[in-house]
């Protein structure tokens, strides 16, 4: 079986390849949409259909808990319409500096949006406020 760290590095390198092909903004848009689509599919494959639909804020708190449990980051906190992620696997795997407009950050934003929509059937807009290796702060509306 392939090591999960190797798969993660390959995925991040693929993100960088998309950025090189279509530019940073284009890659951010495409990868955000990819995250929105893959988030619900990942949750459904792990937990099946949810027995209840929850409000958006509850879904955001649950998203933080699920993502931490799955190993996406060491610490994920949802508070006051903000999501703070520390020591995440994605930005740690990027070889260059990470900024708010990095495609890997937009993929993670889309993944969060997909998780929230799967649980609440409401749309969340996740905007990167601050990003660097090992730290991402999102504003959620």
Image: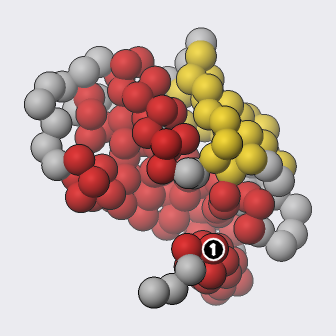
Report whether residue 22 is seen.
no
Q: How many numbered marks are there?
A: 1
For the point 51% across and 33% down, which residue is it?
Answer: 64
In the displayed orientation, state which residue is furthest to the top. Answer: 80
Please name whichever residue, 94 or 5, is drawn nearer the observer in this view of the structure: 5
Is residue 77 toward the left or the right of residue 29 in the image? right
Element type at marker 1?
helix
Q: Residues within 10 Å of mark 1 (few under 14, many from 20)?
A: few
93 w.r.t. 138: above or below? below
Please name whichever residue, 30 or 91, is drawn nearer the observer in this view of the structure: 91
For the point 77% across and 68% down, which residue is it?
Answer: 94
In the displayed orientation, state which residue is furthest to the front. Answer: 1
Question: Residue 8, position in %: x, y?
Answer: 60, 73
Q: Quadrant of the N terminus?
A: bottom left
The image's colouring method is secondary structure
Q: Which residue is mark 1?
A: 5
- Quadrant of the image occupied by residue 138: top right
Is residue 21 toward the left or the right of residue 44 in the image? right
For the point 51% across and 85% down, which residue is it?
Answer: 2
Question: Residue 34, position in %: x, y?
Answer: 42, 64
79 w.r.t. 116: above or below? above
Question: Residue 69, position in %: x, y?
Answer: 49, 42
Please name whichever residue, 65 or 20, is drawn nearer the observer in this view of the structure: 65
Report whether residue 4 is seen.
yes
Is residue 17 toward the left or the right of residue 2 in the image? right
């Amino acid at each position: 079986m392939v090591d999960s760290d190797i798969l993660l590095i390959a995925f991040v390198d693929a993100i960088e390849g998309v950025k090189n092909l279509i530019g940073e903004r284009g890659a951010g848009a495409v990868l955000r949409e990819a995250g929105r689509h893959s988030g619900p599919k990942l949750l459904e494959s792990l937990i099946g259909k949810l027995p209840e639909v929850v409000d958006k804020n509850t879904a955001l708190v649950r998203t933080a808990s699920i993502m931490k449990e799955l190993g996406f980051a060491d610490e994920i906190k949802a508070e006051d319409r903000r999501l703070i992620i520390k020591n995440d696997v994605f930005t740690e795997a990027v070889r260059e500096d990470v900024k708010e407009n990095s495609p890997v950050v937009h993929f993670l934003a889309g993944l969060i949006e997909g998780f929230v929509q799967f649980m609440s059937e409401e749309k969340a807009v996740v905007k990167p406020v601050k990003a660097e290796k090992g730290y991402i702060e999102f504003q959620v509306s």
